[in-house]
Image (spheres, rainbow, N blue to C red):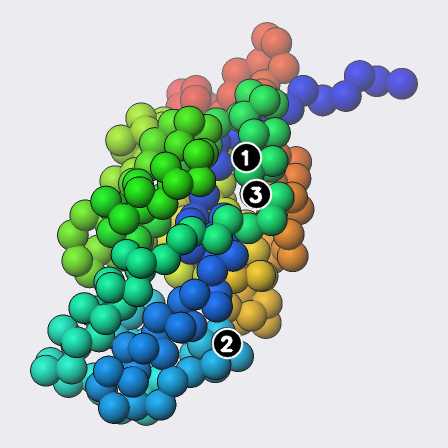
């Protein structure tokens, strides 16, 4: 029997809301409060997931069935920020164990979210998991797209071999951002968008974080055999 192929270490970029956090109900409450603040009806979880999109203003346009006005938008952003600041981060069951397991297996991990950076760092500290991440980045400028934030995140990490990087998230926007930055994505169906929507993004869709990690590692590029050059490195061919 031939020996097992060595596993090439991967770097996992984790999404926060809807992925490591099981916070759909919290987000539904926050968005409902925003809707009610501008005189619109609240939403339920099914409606939230079916209509979810980014950026946030487009999401509220969909929920309202009309464009949100410039006068209403500050009310929405203020109400949402108040709800986010007051919440306790509901870490998904098994997430802490999984992150620790990935670290023990000598893979590396970082965290990227469009949650405001100070809020994100407070929440991560509350979970006690800051030590497992090589880098933590939240949104520092209003309106920053996930693809822009991801590119900045990867450059700050100094990650040169993007073939070994995978983003684990829960939305089609995560998959689009990964594709724009030349990395792989695995999407978790238990977050903000239903599986049938995620399957249109062109990335693998799984139903647990454990399955997402297995897929990220199993599909990692293998290190070249001794004496052979990597085609991606040797550009003289």
* Label disc, if present, on residue 45 of the rendered structure: 2
Quadrant of res 142? bottom left
Say which quadrant the C terminus sits in.
Answer: top left
Position of residue 51 measured from the top left corner of the image (x, y, whole percent): 43, 79
Q: Residue at x 42, y 51 (%)?
A: 89
User: Image height check: is 154 above or below 198?
Assistant: above
As drawn, 122 above or below 7: below
Separation of disc 3 and disc 1 at Cα? 6 Å
Q: Position of residue 180 (x, y in %)?
A: 35, 51
Label 2 – label 3 distance at C-alpha: 22 Å
* Residue identified by numbered label 3: 95
Which one is nearer the viewer's eye here, 62 or 121?
121
Q: Secondary structure at mark 2?
A: helix
The reply to whether residue 85 is in sight is: yes
Left or right: 222 with respect to 108?
right
Mark 3–mark 1 contact, CB under 8 Å? yes
Question: Which residue is pictured at 80% across the width and 16% down the height?
Answer: 3
- Mark 1 crowdedness (10 Å alpha carbons): few <14, some 14-19, many ≥20: many
Residue for badge 1: 99
Indicate the secondary structure of the residue bearing disc 3: helix
């Amino acid at each position: 029997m031939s020996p097992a192929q060595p596993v090439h270490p991967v770097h996992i970029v984790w999404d926060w809301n809807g992925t490591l956090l099981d916070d759909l109900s919290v987000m539904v409450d926050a968005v409902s409060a925003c809707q009610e603040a501008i005189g619109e009806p609240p939403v339920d979880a099914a409606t939230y997931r079916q209509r979810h999109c980014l950026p946030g203003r487009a999401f509220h346009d969909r929920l309202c069935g009309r464009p949100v006005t410039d006068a209403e938008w500050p009310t929405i952003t203020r109400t949402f920020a108040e709800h986010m600041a007051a919440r306790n981060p509901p870490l998904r069951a098994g997430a802490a164990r999984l992150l620790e397991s990935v670290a023990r297996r000598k893979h590396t991990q970082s965290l990227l979210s469009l949650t405001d950076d100070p809020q994100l760092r407070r929440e991560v500290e509350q979970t006690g998991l800051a030590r497992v991440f090589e880098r933590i980045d939240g949104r520092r400028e209003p309106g920053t797209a996930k693809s822009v934030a991801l590119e900045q995140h990867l450059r700050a990490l100094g990650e040169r071999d993007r073939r070994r990087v995978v983003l684990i998230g829960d939305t089609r926007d995560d998959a689009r951002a990964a594709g724009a930055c030349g990395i792989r994505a695995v999407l978790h169906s238990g977050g903000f968008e239903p599986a049938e929507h995620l399957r249109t993004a062109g990335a693998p869709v799984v139903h647990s974080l454990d399955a997402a990690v297995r897929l990220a590692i199993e599909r990692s590029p293998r290190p070249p055999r001794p004496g052979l050059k990597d085609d991606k490195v040797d550009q003289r061919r």
